[in-house]
Amino acid sequence: MKLFRDLSSIFKGKEAASANQMYPELLCIHIPKTAGRTFRQALKCHYGEDGVLTLDHQFLKKRNETLEDYPVRNYPVVHGHLFFDQLQPFATPASRWITWLRHPVERVLSNYFFYCTNGYVTRKKKDPHLQLMTLEEYVHLPKKRNVMTRFLGELQLRDCFFVGLQEHYSEDLGQLAKKLNWSLPVEHFQLRINVNSSKPNLHQAISKDSRQVIAALNTEDMALYEEATWLRSQGYWRPRFLT
């Protein structure tokens, strides 16, 4: 984004002043539909609006850009829909990896509802002949399968400083806040739900068979989620990058 490039000279002074702080401190992989927006607000509450760099891999792709075009090392926190492979080159020995997961079936359904009420509507304006995909068509798309696993890439759960589960958002954020000595207002512990009048009816229409199909199409994510659930029960989040 040109704005960031134009401001690069301003950030140089900041970077020199904080060279010993080894930015970024936190590398937060926001997997779609896993409480990422709610968590971002908590991050901004603690680090400030200017302390969190938020980017999206699709945003970068549309502009033919990479993270190298942004002052990543000037920020204590980087958060967004970014893959591990994109963020890994910016990790320092002190960087801490954080992500949130969600039951794969519920995550896929939430992503599909978002497509129906946002993504499709936006594309329909550009292409009036565009047809809405059915749930069956959507879940069989290769790029919509095992999304959590693809975002994390080679990053192992045991190498993360923290992995939270959306289903336990308040409790897990509380644990993370204690680990990082954060003091957050109570409202940041409340998971924000994107209200959409069509969601309840769509959820009720999802049969047990359809849920089983989604689970079968996302076996890697199912295994990842099961591992995260077990690790959470053991209280085991020991990152490689801690000093």
Image (cartoon, rainbow, N blue to C red):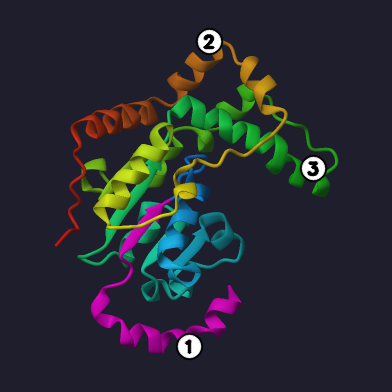
- In the rendered structure, the answer to whether residue 168 lies left or right of residue 200 reads left
Alpha carbons under labels 1 and 2: distance apart: 55 Å
Rendered view: 43 above or below 20: above
Q: Which residue is mark 3?
A: 124
Which picture quadrant has residue 202? top right
**Would you say residue 81 is visible in this rendering?**
no
- In the rendered structure, the answer to whether residue 136 lies left or right of residue 56 reads right
Rendered view: 151 above or below 71: above
Q: Residue at x 69, y 20 (%)?
A: 201
Q: Secondary structure at mark 2?
A: helix
Quadrant where the N terminus lies? Answer: bottom right
Q: Which residues are magenta?
A: 1-29
Q: Residues within 10 Å of mark 1 (few under 14, many from 20)?
A: few
Residue 212, image x and y in percent?
A: 48, 14
Q: Earlier in the sequence, mark 3 or mark 2?
A: 3
The amino acid marked with disc number 3 is: Lys
Q: Residues within 10 Å of mark 2 (few under 14, many from 20)?
A: few
The amino acid marked with disc number 1 is: Ile
The amino acid marked with disc number 2 is: Lys
Q: Residue furthest left?
A: 243
**In the rendering, which numbered label is found on residue 208?**
2
Q: Nearer the viewer, mark 3 or mark 2?
A: 2
Q: Earlier in the sequence, mark 1 or mark 2?
A: 1
Q: Is 24 within the magenta?
A: yes
Q: Which residue is mark 1?
A: 10
Q: Secondary structure at mark 1?
A: helix
**Would you say residue 103 is visible in this rendering?**
yes
Residue 79, image x and y in percent?
A: 44, 58
Q: Earlier in the sequence, mark 3 or mark 1?
A: 1
Q: Are marks 1 and 2 in contact (CB under 8 Å)?
A: no
Alpha carbons under labels 3 and 2: distance apart: 30 Å
